[in-house]
Image (spheres, rainbow, N blue to C red):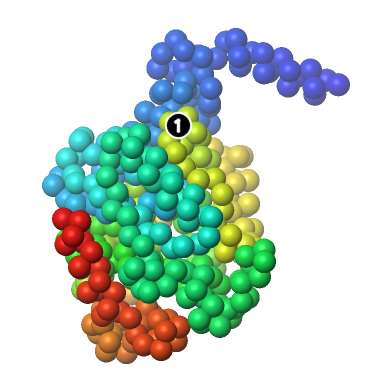
């Protein structure tokens, strides 16, 4: 009973006495690591300012550069695009939004609707590409051609997770588009809670080189365009609240092909969340320490990349992952075809 009364009076105290640090409006959120109470408007401004500080701290974007953002329609990529849209004039860079329709049943239809609503609401244009037009098939058909079975609940039975195949296809297409548009970097919607569990897992397994790819920035190698992560110091909860308070359109549904949990990463994330609760600011401090020492995890010897014998893209093997997948699925490697097709489509858009 005492605990219930305590929570009740604590709630009343919050409602009647907590004011925003920057104005006299009622606060709606507390930032533990900053010891700040903020109203809706100042919370949105606070997150945008932190993203801007992250960009400056890690030198992610310079004046005049061209940045490509792949926007799926989910909260992370949509919030990232919204943030960059609001701060781009402070750095003076060009922002390009891209959406790829993967044809994943109603999920992709809803995602495309989100992109169209966002475009209309914020008067901004997206490049919208259709994977069937680019590759010749949507993702479900591609998985089936690879030998996968898609069950009635959309669970995919295959030797590789559907996310792995999807990621390989999207990365290749995104890189081809980035080269065609001559962008400086591709901005990814990976936040702190995405990255830290994988970084720690790789450290435990002593796969140190992989850690170097998970920092705030990776530079261009050959024709592999560099990546930046402006949400590197932002948590998932902060992004979720930002998206809701900003009122930006985004899809809350999870991709039907994404199922199950990665046990090791989940356990590490739970540990990090506990540390953060007991020591506010712990995760940001860890992220910054990793970023400061990221070069220690890079391989001393220069990575030698070959050219894919089918499409000419850089690869550590003789054939790139994209051409291997498409050759198995369609009987022929589609890398060169996709490069030509994307070039043709983008010329029509330009």
Q: In this view, does 292 lie above or below 20?
A: below
Could you tell me residue 98's position as x and y percent?
31, 54
Q: Outermost residue toward the left?
A: 64
- What residue did someone put label 1 on? 247
Q: Which residue is drawn at 57% across and 10% down?
A: 17
Location of residue 159 by image quarter:
bottom right
Give me the residue at 46% from left, 23% from top: 40
Looking at the picture, tell me which residue is in the foreground, 180 or 242. Answer: 180
| Secondary structure beneath label 1 | loop
**Residue 313 x, y percent position in the rendering:** 26, 79
Q: Which of 108 and 33 is in front in this view?
A: 108
Say which of 59 and 72 sits in front.
Answer: 72
Tell me, yes or no, if residue 164 can be seen here.
no
Q: Quadrant of the N terminus?
A: top right
Name which quarter of the figure residue 3 lies in: top right
The residue that appears at 61% across and 39% down in the rendered structure is 278
Residue at the location (24% across, 47% down)? 95
Whether residue 127 appears in this view of the structure is yes
Q: Is residue 47 left or right of residue 68?
A: right
Q: Where is residue 251 in the image (x, y as percent from the top left)?
A: 50, 46
Q: Horizontal placement of 91 versus 196: left or right?
A: left
Q: Please identify the quarter of the rendering in which residue 298 is found.
A: bottom left
Q: Where is residue 336 in the image (x, y as percent from the top left)?
A: 26, 80
């Amino acid at each position: 009973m005492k605990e219930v009364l305590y929570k009740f009076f604590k709630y009343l105290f919050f409602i009647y006495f907590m004011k925003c640090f920057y104005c006299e409006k009622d606060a709606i959120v507390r930032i533990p690591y900053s010891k700040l109470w903020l109203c809706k408007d100042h919370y949105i401004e606070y997150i945008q300012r932190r993203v801007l500080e992250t960009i400056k701290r890690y030198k992610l974007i310079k004046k005049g550069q061209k940045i490509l953002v792949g926007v799926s329609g989910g909260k992370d990529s949509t919030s990232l695009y919204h943030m960059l849209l609001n701060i781009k004039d402070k750095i003076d860079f060009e922002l390009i939004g891209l959406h790829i329709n993967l044809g994943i049943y109603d999920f992709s239809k809803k995602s495309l609707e989100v992109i169209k609503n966002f475009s209309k609401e914020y008067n901004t244009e997206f490049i919208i590409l259709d994977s069937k037009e680019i590759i010749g098939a949507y993702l479900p058909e591609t998985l089936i051609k690879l030998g996968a079975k898609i069950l009635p609940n959309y669970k995919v039975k295959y030797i590789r997770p559907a996310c792995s195949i999807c990621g390989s296809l999207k990365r290749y297409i995104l890189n081809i588009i980035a080269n065609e548009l001559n962008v400086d970097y591709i901005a990814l919607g990976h936040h702190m809670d995405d990255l830290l569990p994988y970084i720690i897992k790789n450290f435990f397994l002593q796969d140190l080189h992989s850690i170097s790819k998970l920092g705030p920035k990776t530079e261009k190698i050959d024709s592999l365009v560099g990546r930046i992560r402006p949400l590197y110091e932002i948590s998932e909860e902060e992004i979720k609240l930002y998206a809701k308070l900003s009122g930006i359109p985004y899809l809350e549904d999870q991709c039907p092909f994404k199922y199950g949990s990665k046990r090791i990463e989940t356990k590490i994330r739970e540990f990090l969340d506990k540390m953060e609760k007991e020591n506010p600011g712990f995760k940001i401090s860890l992220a910054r320490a990793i970023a400061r020492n990221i070069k220690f995890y890079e391989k001393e010897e220069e990575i030698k990349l070959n050219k894919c014998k089918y499409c000419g893209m850089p690869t550590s093997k003789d054939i790139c992952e994209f051409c291997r997948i498409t050759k198995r699925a369609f009987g022929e490697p589609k890398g060169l075809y996709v490069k030509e097709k994307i070039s043709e489509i983008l010329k029509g858009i330009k």
